Image: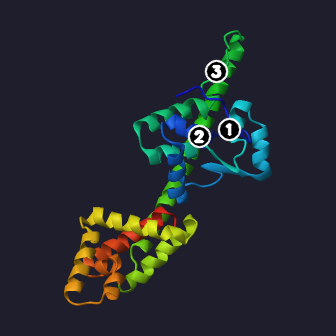
Amino acid sequence: MSKLIPMEFKNQRIMTTKVLAEEFGTEEKNIQMNFSNNQSRFKEGKHFIELKGQALKDFKNSLPNEIGEPLKFAPKLILWTDRGAARHAKILDTDEAWEVYEELEESYFNPNKGQALNTSELSPELQMFNKMFQALANNELEQKRLNKKLKEVEEETGELKEEIQGIREAVTLEPNQWRKDTATLINKIANKLGGFEHIKPIRDEAYSLLNNTYGVDINRRLLNKKKNMALEGCSKSKIDKVNYLDVIAEDKKLINGYINIVGRLAVKYGIK
């Protein structure tokens, strides 16, 4: 881990996306992509802080030149908290990311941890009272730490329950109207990502997952279907209208698989 210049926002240690990526040994765009693909797993104020407008301007002005200069023209800024960095380490799931996070947790995000006061020159009475006070203080701090951990576990459990429920609801689409339901979910995903130009990439992702998960080649199946239709004397206009969904519709296994995959994509992109 490199020597980091401490950055704080409202007395809380934070880290920019660029610095977090450098420390974790990955590209900045990977951090941004992981955040975009897992937005439902990140909560503003707990995992990250988004700055824009006057708040961003004030923050930039508070930074040393070597840090503030690269951010000079940024229209908005995401600052990652300790828990946000931990969430990214979990998503990256590499040995390097976990090792670096442990170091960040010990030193960067908890700068006062381990600092001790030299009490050797105190009188014996004060040293005794100091030890008693330290014992009480340590007990209280440990209790608070345990309570904080318990709260985090409860929150994580709550998020997991919501995700499981979302999966259950998403993957139990009505088989008799699967085309309509899956199209609705894909449209919602595209809209959340920024517009309907994302429909095709989402469909392509679903088809790719279908091929890999169920060991099929729907592109080849589509070509074979079109050849058979041509041999049967179907018109070119009718053949041209045939698509992957028509191929999927001929196989109940693929219908169920496609429903499952689109449902999981909906959960992945935070559609409830």
* Residue 272 x, y percent position in the rendering: 52, 70
Residue located farthest toward the top when viewing the structure as drawn: 121
Which residue type carries mark 2? Lys
Quadrant of residue 95 in the image? top left
Compare residues 45 and 191 and report the one nearer the observer.
191
- Left or right: residue 36 compared with residue 95: right
Kindly indicate whether the residue at mark 3 contacts the one at mark 1 (C-beta within 8 angstroms): no
Q: Which residue is mark 2?
A: 18
Query: How far is the residue under mark 3 from the one under mark 2?
Result: 33 Å
**Residue underneath mark 1:** 70
Vertical placement of residue 55 versus 163, above or below:
above
- List the residue tagged with mark 3: 116
User: Which dot, 3 or 2, sits closer to the camera?
Assistant: 2
Residue 65, position in %: x, y?
A: 74, 31
Please name whichever residue, 117 or 130, is drawn nearer the observer in this view of the structure.
117
Which SS class for mark 1? helix
Q: Are marks 1 and 2 in contact (CB under 8 Å)?
A: yes
Q: Earlier in the sequence, mark 1 or mark 3?
A: 1
Task: Identify which amino acid the numbered label 1 is placed on.
Answer: Pro
**Disc 1 or disc 2, which is closer to the eye?**
1
> Mark 2 or mark 1, which is nearer the start of the sequence?
2
Label 1 to label 3: alpha-carbon separation: 37 Å
Rendered location of residue 44, percent (x, y): 64, 54
Q: Quadrant of residue 13?
A: top right
Q: Give the class, few, some or many, for how many residues have Cα within 10 Å of label 2's Cα (few <14, many ≥20).
A: some
Q: Residue at x 55, y 31 (%)?
A: 106
